[in-house]
Image (spheres, grey):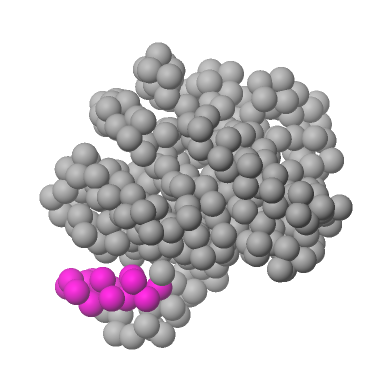
Amino acid sequence: MNEFIRQLPKIELHDHLDGGLRTQTVFELLQEKKNNFKIKSLEELSQYIEGNISKGSLADYLKNFELTTAVMQSYNNLKRIAYESAEDLHNENVVYAEIRFAPELHTREGLTLQEVINAVREGLIQAEEKLQIKTNIIICLIREASQEEAKEIAQLCIDNFGDKVCGFDIAGKENGNPPEKYIQIFRMLKSNNIPVTIHAGEESDYSYINAAILDCKAKRIGHGIKSANVPDKLCLDIIKQHEIHLEVCISSNIQTKVVESVELHPAKILKKKGINFSLCSDNRLMSKTNISQELKIASKELKFSKKDLVQMQKLAIKNSFATDEIKKEILEKIENFEKINRPQ
Ligand SMILES: [Zn+2]
């Protein structure tokens, strides 16, 4: 199975740039600038990251993002990190990836929002010139943003749409920040035909998923796992009716303790109910995972078959925000793999 997963052309739809850096790169970039983290060796850095993960509180978890965003404040660093992100994905045979980040987190040392986009775009294009991978950018808005800030980020997305930027997302603390808080922004995006995915139903309840779909017109939902256990099935019906794709991140959910264990993960229920979803990594560094690892978990712990895993890649590319041309090209790669391997 592991070799099958390695060779399978894979799609990654939910991958945060600031959650997927190489530890080695974080260390090197920290050394280059005066850092407040006082980390002296690679080993110490790994222990620091691991320590924050194992403490299990959201505040500790977020300390790791303070660390990564600290080294993501210059054009060259962002470009390098974007390049390496695509290279790492390519090395596990991801053939198409949508990488997301919040530009506003990278302007602390003088970069403009547009320069942040340019840097990441340049890194990704450089990777694509060398490697067999296609990538796009999803621009995130942090949910605590004011309406004015939100409007600026949405405009940035509209201005860059089609030039590697393929969609818009809202991320960050869910509870208290329902998607409809930004209803005007979503209307603005809709009138410009910008596809939207929204983090919803990860820590919050299913009403956030309903609002993301019905009020904010999201085409995909980040996580959306709280839909699985709603007794009246209303939420799952809405997901089906509107042909919504869920970006499900098993390891991330366990790590942030929104789900107790892999065995109890709603992915099993979603599959049984015929929901359109794919598995994603969320944060490769913080959750110590990647898409291959997520597929291995699904196969081993949740009894997903080889056929299920291939089908999932097809659903992922069909529901990606790529152009029709890229969708067709990638779908052919998956179908060729399927013809040769005849998964059961
Ligand atoms: Zn996420």
Q: Could you tell me residue 12's position as x and y percent?
A: 55, 49
**Left or right of 31 on screen, residue 19:** right
Please determine whether, in this image, residue 276 is positioned above or below residue 265: above
Q: Quadrant of residue 100?
A: top left
Q: Could you tell me residue 233's position as x and y percent?
A: 79, 27
Magenta: predominant secondary structure element? helix
The foreground one among 308 and 172 is 308
Q: Could you tell me residue 48's position as x and y percent?
A: 42, 76
Please determine whether, in this image, residue 187 is positioned above or below residue 89: above
Q: Quadrant of residue 289?
A: bottom right
Q: Quadrant of residue 257?
A: bottom right
The residue that appears at 20% across and 55% down in the rendered structure is 75
Magenta residues span: 23-37
**Left or right of 215 on screen, residue 106:** left
The residue that appears at 78% across and 56% down in the rendered structure is 341
Q: Could you tell me residue 103's position as x and y percent?
A: 29, 44
